Amino acid sequence: MMQVLTGARIFDGARFLDGHALVIENGVIAAILPEAEAPAQGRRAVAGILAPGFLDLQVNGGGGVMVDGATDLAALKHICAAHRGLGTAGILPTLITDTAQATAQVIAAGIAATAQVPGFLGLHLEGPHLDPRRKGAHDPGLIRPMDQDDLARLCEAARRLPALMVTLAPEAATPQQIAALAGAGAVVSLGHSDCTYDEAQAALAAGARCVTHLFNAMSQIGHRAPGLAGAVLSGDAGAGLIADGIHVHPAVMRLALAARPAGIFLVSDCMAFAGTALTEMELGGRQVLRRDGRLTLADGTLAGADLTLPQAVAKLVHAVGIAPERALAMATSVPAALIGLQDSHGALAPGRRAEIVLLDRDFALRESWL
């Protein structure tokens, strides 16, 4: 079956193609060519922007379900399906700080999900090897340094999953452990850390190549002490950004994106609320409240974000002033490259699966082919 989509701007992962048609045959992109050269059969006019399905490397839950110690294959299917309904073609389901048993359970579920759950790209393990001084909404009673059993478990997971991101603090893992994780194929991301600039640089030199939710739960930039945030903005590591205007002020996002013309990507850091009308949920026995676009613990601590990637793209374009093609790349081709999936995800090109979203002029999701 052939479908020829015309009338929209096509974002291919790097640039806009105007006046072009997107040809889909049997779920695969057959061609992107000038509309005048497109087949007459199966034509359908659409308005807005056609873009690759979005990729989200930090997803704590969705559809009313959290990633936790009870997560199994069915839960991962449910969460991935919930996000595909929101325009996100692929995700890294994310387990925040928990026990070794919970980590092993989620890894086992992820291995079972590999190659059989649409939208499952791998896992993100955010903790427990963090700095309690920058705990955020993580349970401080479960935060601990990495030991050899932890390292062996993570290295094995990195070898068996399509992608594994591990967020850790340099204070809780040695450079040798970071190097071993990177050598096994994990994307080591620094986060929830009060490290100095020099400590951050040592971790990056050991093999870390990303930072989790830039500016949040990390040492900040001072003119004599640049901290982890300063190491990111003066270097070339990747960095996730929660662009809801709450976690990071638009003016600071603008400064960061000017300092780093490449490497920063969008994450939702969403919770089980995503795709639901829920107003409350539990996180490790603590209540999380959803109020006015903000998710907090009872004491006001931010606990994830009430955000979708189309909303994040819109925020970057309308509130921060970022060019649409860069904002879209930050939700598609940039995260794909970070986790090594640039040959299969994050771009529209002949031969690739038709994982496509249609956005309106305000970047709201109108339709998807996933």
Image (cartoon, helix red, strand yellow):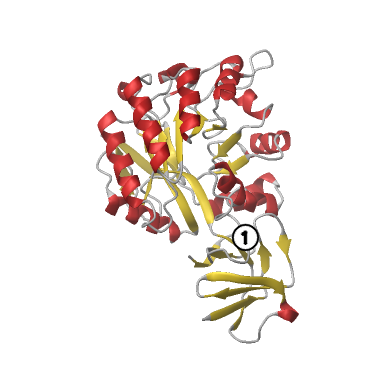
Q: Nearer the viewer, residue 151 or 125?
A: 151
Q: Relative to 127, is 107 above or below?
A: below
Q: Is residue 279 visible?
A: yes
Residue depicted at x 56% and y 45%: 335
Residue 312, x across and y down, in percent: 56, 49
Secondary structure type for disc 1: loop
Where does residue 276 sit, x and y in percent of width and height? 37, 55
Q: Which is more toward the observer, 118 or 5? A: 118
**Residue in the foreground of this view, choosing between 19 and 108:** 108
Q: Residue 206: horizontal and vertical position, in percent?
A: 55, 22
The part of the image, by quadrant, that contains residue 201 is top right
Q: Give the number of callouts.
A: 1
Compared across the picture, whether 229 is left or right of 113 comes to right
Residue position marked by numbered label 1 in the rendering: 362
Residue at the (28%, 29%) spot, across then down: 100
Vertically, is 171 above or below 209?
Answer: above
Q: Relative to 207, is 11 above or below?
A: below
> Dividing the picture into quarters, in which one does residue 238 lie?
top right
* Amino acid identity at mark 1: Asp
Please report the residue visible at 50 percent of the width from the left and 75 percent of the height from the top: 26
Q: Would you say residue 99 is visible in this rendering?
A: no
Point out residue 296 in the picture as x, y percentages from the top left corner: 40, 37
Q: Residues within 10 Å of mark 1 (few under 14, many from 20)?
A: some
Q: Residue furthest bottom?
A: 41
